[in-house]
């Protein structure tokens, strides 16, 4: 029972991680990543106040977080 609950919560991280991994293959520009992060944060805020969507709030917030990490990695490559 406890293991099942842990696996259910993992989907909120695995799905957005897969989405961002697919987006990395598209080689988006810096400004496109910023727009993606802002949209993820706005969707998270909107989902917090929606009665049914509140349960899926990790999806856009994890996309925004993973996109931010991808953006940081892109900038580290440019500094070398």
Image: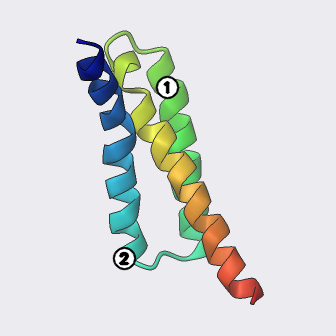
Figure check: 64 above or below 31: above
Within 10 Å of disc 1 (Cα), the crowding (few <14, some 14-19, many 20+) is few
The label shown at residue 63 is none
Q: Is mark 2 on a helix, strand or loop?
A: helix
Figure check: 71 above or below 57: below
At a point 55% along the width and 27% down the height, the residue shown is 45
Q: Which residue lies furthest to the right in this view?
A: 79
Depth check: give the residue in front, 45 or 64.
64
At a point 75% along the width and 90% down the height, the residue shown is 80
Q: In this view, does 77 lie to the left or right of 42?
A: right
Among numbered discs 2 and 1, the one appearing first in the sequence: 2
Q: What element carries label 1?
A: helix
Figure check: 75 above or below 3: below
Which of the 4 image quadrants contains residue 15? top left
Question: Mark 1 sits on what residue?
Answer: 46
Q: Position of residue 12 (x, y in %)?
A: 36, 35
Q: In this view, does 41 lie to the left or right of 22?
A: right
Within 10 Å of disc 2 (Cα), the crowding (few <14, some 14-19, many 20+) is few
Calculate the distance from the C-alpha at mark 2 to the C-alpha at mark 1: 28 Å
At a point 62% along the width and 76% down the height, the residue shown is 74
The label shown at residue 25 is 2
Q: Position of residue 67 (x, y in %)?
A: 53, 57
Q: Where is residue 31 in the image (x, y as percent from the top left)?
A: 61, 69
């Amino acid at each position: 029972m406890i293991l099942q609950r842990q696996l259910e919560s993992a989907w909120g991280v695995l799905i957005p991680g897969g989405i961002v991994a697919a987006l990395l293959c598209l080689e988006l520009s810096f400004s496109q990543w910023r727009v993606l992060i802002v949209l993820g944060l706005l969707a998270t805020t909107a989902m917090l106040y929606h009665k049914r969507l509140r349960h899926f709030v990790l999806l856009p917030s994890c996309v925004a977080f993973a996109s931010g990490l991808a953006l940081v990695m892109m900038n580290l490559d440019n500094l070398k």
